Image: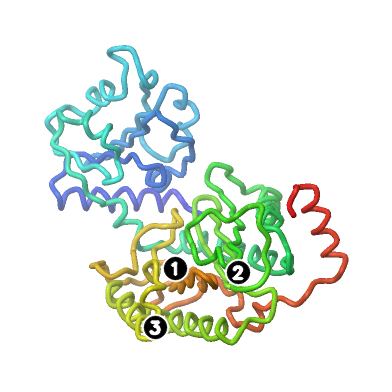
Amino acid sequence: MITEEDYEKRLVNLQNQMKVHNLSAFLVTEPHSIYYFTGASYEAQERPFIIIIWASGSPSFLVPKLEEEHMKKAKIGEVSSYWEYPSPKGDSWIEKLYEILKPGNEVGIEPEMSGIMQSQLSKYNIKPIDLVGDLRLVKSSNELEMIRYTAQNSDKLMGLIMKNSYYGVSVLELFGLSRKIQMSLIKTGMYDPLACSFLSANWPAPHSAKPHSIPPVYGVLKNGPNVAMSYNRINGYAAECERTFFLTKPTPKEVEIFNDMLAARQLALNMLKPGASCNDIDKIVYDFLVEKGYGDNLLHRTGHGIGQDNHEGPYIARGSTTELEEHMVVSIEPGIYIPEIGGFRHSDTVLITNSGYELLTNYPTDIDTLTIQPKKMLKRIKGKIIKIAMGIK
């Protein structure tokens, strides 16, 4: 778990960077960043939450009056409040901010801050700079413990998906499996509902060639490369596991594409180590797949960072200037997408170690394991009953 010492170290690290950039204050407004400094989860909605971090000393936390008592649990300095959004004159968030942070200061802000909020800060000399994102790149030992736990549960959920898959299974049946992981966590007594999310998603072929589309929830999985996603965030820390799998014997062409995807994945993994260029890793994987003839079938980068968010830095992409460091956590997920056949992509959560990498998700990747044998008649009958109840043909 994350300790008081962790929160104090994060604050000091940010303050040190503020001094480098000559900032008198830094406004933390992005929900995951606020969680990073406080351990407090909340539903942001339209009301701003702002941590004012000074170059030295204890921070201030400005929240809506509605949340003031609730946010006193935050592991941060003094909590003060504004009335509402919108508010009567004299009691808005920006007027309360003026009382705490005098106009004219050099103030850093997160790049994700909305344009509407930025427009209200004209009395400050603001500087959008991703200091918090940079701090979050390298994980502490306690953060890695949290990510490992989420990764283990991602493997468990992938196992449930495979165990419950059969020719003709509905997308909705498999969606519901994430509930089992959620219930098991609730039973541990260590469940923060606002800092947890669970997703068991499946893209049937050939729809799996559209990796960021919404799965056809009333569809069923049959022939071709289906793609399963186990995508979780547990008590503030994320992990993901994705697998391409088959419910009938794959064709020779499908086997060939699957093996090329595996080769690209292994090529990427073999390059992971401290000092490796994110740009170079992605370029080498991209060039490999282009040489294999898939130039028109590539839709995304090789991977991205994982931590408090399922998608964060570093980005393993051409154009990135980042080099990998020990204790970064990334996904590796090169994909091949053939519109008339489907998608071929595995994704794993991977830790950068002092000499290479460690897979934190370990569900099998071979085509034999991922070709699911026909289920017993009872399982198929159960699935038929579920589909009838849901009106699925």
Residue 272 percent across, percent down from the top left:
37, 78
Q: Residue at x 43, y 78 (%)?
A: 357
257 or 28: which is nearer to us?
Answer: 257
Q: Which residue is mark 3?
A: 293
Left or right of 116: which side holds 377? right
Question: What amino acid is found at the position of numbered circle 3 in the picture?
Answer: Gly
Left or right of 65: which side holds 204? right
Q: CA distance from mark 2 to mark 1?
A: 20 Å
- SS class, disc 3: loop
Specify few, some or many for label 3: CA neighbours under 10 Å numbering under 14, 14-19, or 20 or more.
few
- SS class, disc 1: strand
Q: Which residue is mark 2?
A: 226
Q: Earlier in the sequence, mark 2 or mark 1?
A: 2
Q: Earlier in the sequence, mark 2 or mark 3?
A: 2
Q: Which residue is mark 1?
A: 331
Asked if 147 appears above or below 62 in the picture, the reply is below
Point out the frontmost of discs 3 and 1: 3
Specify few, some or many for label 2: CA neighbours under 10 Å numbering under 14, 14-19, or 20 or more.
many
Q: Residue at x 29, y 57 (%)?
A: 134
Residue 74 percent across, percent down from the top left:
44, 37
Question: What amino acid is found at the position of numbered circle 1 in the picture?
Answer: Ser
* Residues at discs 3 and 1 in contact (Cβ within 8 Å): no
